[in-house]
Image (tube, coloured by chain):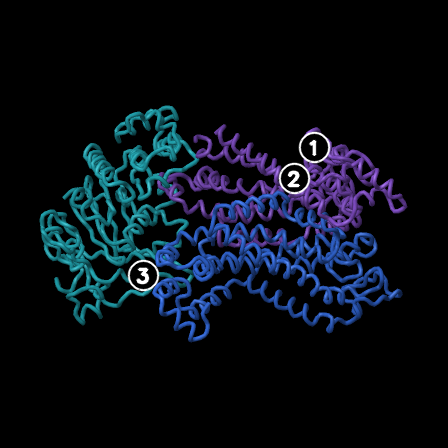
């Protein structure tokens, strides 16, 4: 087995509405990421996938959220106990992140060059002029034809696709080991989406980094990932290599998700959907969190919560039916 | 709003009414409770409210509980500092300042409150119409408030008094006019916001008439910003009215208006500083109470700011 | 950008025209015969007629307005009823004092206000935040005339450190600038706090942190600079507010500025002077807002590069 780049163990993140009362947004989340691997983290909105990524990056400041339990081990170092300085070195250096809204993720009152140089200078010993050269080079790599012009622009002068390319370039500028991409294509037009995904794949191949791809779009997962983690209501419900997940989903929730994706030529007129909606974080059902929406749910499911267990040597599932 | 069961019955008949009211006043009683609970957590706002309640009570019964006749001269006790007999001291005619403040509460609060109420009503209607109809009405309302806004703060009130001449009624008119443009602007922008929201579009598409749309559907949606601005404006109205009185434009010198009391104290600054400190302190506490209360209301009604 | 500036500059002309119409017609709506006032009580009918002729008061009001505007463009605002001096000269000699006061307020209040607001936002919910906001709401609620009188009582009468009137030495500016600036400081502290809080929630602040940038630089070079763009938009209103503050400040500290002239003219019903002053106050306010808008254009790249 190759070396593990990132190990998340038993992560719990809570959101505090006051000092005493809180809701658990992410619970018992454990997974691993190997070098050079693209892993998808999927689930409906509000299932805790973005909170998981922000917890890994330690970017929960200015939200009421706080990691209250678990370990995030990146390149052998536990980020939750690391010093502020160590975190600042890792963030944007060996671990970087791109976000859902490229347009609002760039500082509107700063030119692109300053925003890119800022990151490069923080993590390398390059001079400003050298950093600028490097920024231009990376912009070319992400498919921007005239990097010199873009460098002089302000964000509002760029389109959404361009902005996301700039964001990717910024994230790539210090050769990260891990790129966390939080819904990187959701806010973009369909044609641009395909281009950005293609670009990410290309860069991943060239640089050999790992990508944690957070998305609600199973099509994107099928296209990009080798392994998939499915989250529901703050917990992982299934984990499997991508072909196994699509071929043989074990958790009823995953089955529902896959069945609701339209397939070309299948002739199905009405797509099946999962009844009900994600439970409110403050009033989680006892027992399996999916039980209220699950057509197979039994009395046991409603009373006792199942564990995430291996159903075969490649697949894990959190469901009483498989235990 | 529908109150009697019969009216309720009638409104239940129309589909759009059901659809919309669900959004606006869903579960009214529990939302009121929730609101009160949240508001009570803000201690400074509750303190502000308590002071306001006390002030209103004083405004009603102030003259009856005053220890002295607020207008009675006492030439043996002129400019006396605070003592057991005269808690806040006496003024240059020997009148008891504490009694004058109690008796003046009605005048000061009355002028400010009534001018804000009338100004707010006018501004609200103008803002609603401007936001809803747009076009010429909007242009007229907005340009006029631009003009009024060109005389910042109390300068507008002073300008109006400059034209109408001094006097308490003119102060009322001045503060009222000074209140109108702020409401017109706020109501216009929240009307525009509510107007484009989904539930109003639904009502419109279902053929709801203008007047009904405006007052049944749009107005309730803007009421939060209205309440918050209203509370905030009372503070500035008290400030404006007492500033005018201080400058000598408002109440008669014989009236126990707080600002007017301060105005006279200027000449006795050397010998009787209590004439400055205490009436001013009362104005300060009153304005502070309304501002704290308004802040608390805003934070409770609009949690995204905090 | 130059198009934005030219557009803003051109918007002033109609606004000033409307203001002049408002001021002129309202002043002429006032009951009473200015010619009789001017001539005095003992004047004969012929004398009153002569004055009416001389001042053009017998012409239709529209014609009077155009005459007034024509003269205004030549820098002539008529003569004072009280002193018979040209209004333009009277205002010109007073203006420097008012501008000095406004400047004394601008010097410290916005800077301190924005500083307090930003610090409160950074330390949101902690003791420092509560203290800062309590300070701000206190400043907002304290009447300027009260602060000024207390300042005189403490620092001039009791301690003798500062003069109680006039702007002869730098010491003379201390108390007036305090009275001028307190309100603005408070408003800006509150506004820049909420604007900074809003900015801190922006995606690009998270991006800056994701780069591994130090918290201090995230705050100042990413968050603060952008929140300042919002704060500048209300700066014009606030600095304009200083103009109205000058009326009170000049009265308290016996400074012979435009505000004091306005008050005196109101008592004497010296309409040409009132009219001229109102026009100048409005013009100054409009110009201040224009300058602030231009500043906004300079610091906001969205406008600069359109």
Disc sitting over residue C112 in the figure: none
Q: Mark 2 points at which residue?
A: C20
Residue A239: x, y in percent? 17, 53
Give left or right: position of C36 versus B64. right
Determine whether the residue tagged by mark 1 lies in a helix, strand or loop: helix
Residue A42: x, y in percent? 22, 51
Residue plotted at (42% across, 40% down): C214
- Both on one chain, marks 3 and 1? no
Disc sitting over residue C72 in the figure: 1
Q: In which quarter of the image is residue C108?
A: top right
Image vertical order of residue C76 relative to residue B35, above or below: above
Chain C as rendered: colour: purple
Chain A as rendered: colour: cyan
Please give the count of numbered marks on the rendered protein: 3
Q: Earlier in the sequence, mark 1 or mark 2?
A: 2
Disc 2 versus disc 3: nearer the observer = 2
Q: Name the residue under label 3.
A: A281
As measured in the structure, the alpha-carbon distance from the residue carrying label 1 to the one carrying label 2 is 10 Å
Write down the chain letter for disc 1. Answer: C
The one nearer the camera, C162 or B208, is: B208
Residue A243: x, y in percent? 11, 48
Residue A76: x, y in percent? 26, 44
Colour-to-chain, blue:
B
The quarter in which the C terminus of chain C is drawn is top left
Residue C84 visible in this rendered orientation of the protein: yes
């Amino acid at each position: 087995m190759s070396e593990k780049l990132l190990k998340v163990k038993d992560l719990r993140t809570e959101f505090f509405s006051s000092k005493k009362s809180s809701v658990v947004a992410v619970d018992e989340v454990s997974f691993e990421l190997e070098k050079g691997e693209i892993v998808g983290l999927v689930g409906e909105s509000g299932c805790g996938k973005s909170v998981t990524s922000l917890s890994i990056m330690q970017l929960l400041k200015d939200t009421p959220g706080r990691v209250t339990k678990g370990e995030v081990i990146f390149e052998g170092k536990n980020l939750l106990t690391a010093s502020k300085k160590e975190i600042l070195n890792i963030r944007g250096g060996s671990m970087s992140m791109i976000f859902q809204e490229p347009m609002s993720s760039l500082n509107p009152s700063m030119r692109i060059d300053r925003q890119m140089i800022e990151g490069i200078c923080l993590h390398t010993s390059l001079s400003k002029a050298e950093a600028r050269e490097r920024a231009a080079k990376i912009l070319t790599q992400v498919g921007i034809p005239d990097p010199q012009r873009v460098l002089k622009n302000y964000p509002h002068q760029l389109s959404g696709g361009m902005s996301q390319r700039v964001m990717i370039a910024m994230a790539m500028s210090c050769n990260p080991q891990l790129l966390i991409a939080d819904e990187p294509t959701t806010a973009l037009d369909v044609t641009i989406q395909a281009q950005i995904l293609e670009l990410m794949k290309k860069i991943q191949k060239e640089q050999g980094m790992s990508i944690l791809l957070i998305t609600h779009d199973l099509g994107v997962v099928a296209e990009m990932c080798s392994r998939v983690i499915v989250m529901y209501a703050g917990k992982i419900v299934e984990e499997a290599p991508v072909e196994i997940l699509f071929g043989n989903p074990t958790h009823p929730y995953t089955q529902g998700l896959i069945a609701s994706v339209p397939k070309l030529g299948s002739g199905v007129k009405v797509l099946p959907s999962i009844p009900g909606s994600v439970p409110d974080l403050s009033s989680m059902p006892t027992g399996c969190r999916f039980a209220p929406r699950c057509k197979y749910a039994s009395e046991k499911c409603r009373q006792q919560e199942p564990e995430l267990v291996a159903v075969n040597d490649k697949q894990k599932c959190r469901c009483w039916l498989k235990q | 709003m529908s109150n009697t069961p019969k009216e309720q019955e009638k409104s239940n008949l129309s589909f759009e009414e059901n659809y919309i009211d669900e959004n606006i006043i869903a579960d009214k009683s529990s939302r009121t409770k929730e609101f009160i609970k949240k508001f009570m957590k803000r201690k400074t706002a509750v303190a502000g409210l308590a002071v306001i309640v006390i002030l209103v009570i004083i405004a009603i019964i102030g003259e009856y509980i005053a220890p002295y006749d607020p207008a009675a001269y006492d030439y043996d006790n002129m400019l006396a500092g605070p003592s057991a007999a005269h808690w806040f001291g006496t003024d240059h005619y020997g009148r008891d300042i504490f009694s004058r403040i109690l008796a003046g509460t009605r005048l000061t609060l009355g002028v400010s409150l009534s001018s804000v109420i009338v100004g707010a009503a006018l501004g609200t209607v103008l803002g609603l119409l401007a936001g809803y109809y747009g076009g010429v009405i909007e242009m007229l309302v907005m340009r006029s408030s631009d003009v009024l806004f060109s005389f910042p703060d109390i300068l507008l009130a002073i300008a109006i008094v400059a034209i109408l001449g001094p006097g308490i009624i003119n102060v009322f008119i001045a503060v009222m006019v000074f209140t109108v443009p702020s409401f017109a602007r706020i109501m216009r922008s929240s009307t525009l916001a509510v107007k484009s929201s989904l539930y109003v579009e639904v009502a419109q598409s279902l053929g709801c008439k203008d007047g009904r749309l405006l007052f049944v559907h749009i107005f309730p949606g803007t009421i939060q910003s209205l309440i918050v601005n209203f509370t905030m404006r009372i503070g500035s109205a008290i400030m404006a009215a007492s500033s005018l009185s201080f400058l000598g434009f408002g109440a008669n010198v014989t009236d126990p208006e707080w600002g007017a009391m301060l105005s006279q104290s200027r000449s006795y600054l050397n010998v009787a500083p209590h004439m400055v400190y205490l009436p001013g302190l009362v104005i300060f506490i009153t304005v502070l109470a309304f501002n704290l209360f308004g802040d608390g209301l805003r934070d409770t009604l609009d949690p995204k700011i905090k | 950008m130059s198009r934005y500036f030219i557009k803003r500059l051109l918007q002033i002309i109609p606004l000033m025209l409307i203001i002049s119409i408002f001021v002129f017609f309202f002043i002429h709506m006032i009951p009473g015969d200015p010619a009789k006032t001017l001539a005095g009580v003992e004047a004969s009918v012929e004398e009153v007629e002569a004055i009416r002729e001389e001042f053009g008061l017998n012409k239709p009001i529209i014609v009077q307005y155009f005459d007034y505007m024509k003269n205004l463009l030549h820098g002539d605002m008529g003569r004072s009823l009280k002193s018979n001096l040209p209004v333009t000269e009277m205002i010109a000699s007073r203006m420097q004092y008012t501008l000095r006061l406004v400047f004394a307020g601008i010097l410290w209040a916005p800077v301190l206000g924005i500083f307090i607001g930003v610090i409160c936002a950074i330390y949101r919910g902690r003791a420092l935040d509560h203290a800062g906001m309590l300070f701000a709401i206190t400043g907002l609620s304290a009447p300027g005339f009260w602060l000024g009188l207390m300042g005189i009582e403490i620092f001039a009468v009791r301690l003798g450190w500062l003069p109680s009137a006039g702007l002869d030495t730098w010491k003379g500016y201390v108390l007036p600038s305090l009275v001028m600036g307190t309100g603005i400081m408070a408003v800006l502290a509150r506004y820049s706090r909420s604007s900074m809080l809003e900015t801190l929630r922006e995606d690009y602040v998270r991006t800056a942190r994701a780069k591994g940038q130090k918290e201090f630089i995230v705050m100042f070079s990413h968050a603060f600079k952008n929140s300042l763009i919002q704060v500048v938009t209300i700066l014009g209103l606030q600095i304009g507010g200083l103009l109205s503050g000058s009326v009170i400040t000049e009265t308290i500290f016996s400074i012979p500025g435009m505000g004091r002239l306005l008050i005196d003219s109101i008592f004497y019903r010296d309409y040409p002077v009132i009219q001229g002053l109102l026009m100048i106050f409005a013009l100054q306010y409009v110009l201040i807002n224009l300058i602030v808008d231009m500043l906004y254009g300079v610091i906001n790249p969205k406008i600069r590069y359109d």
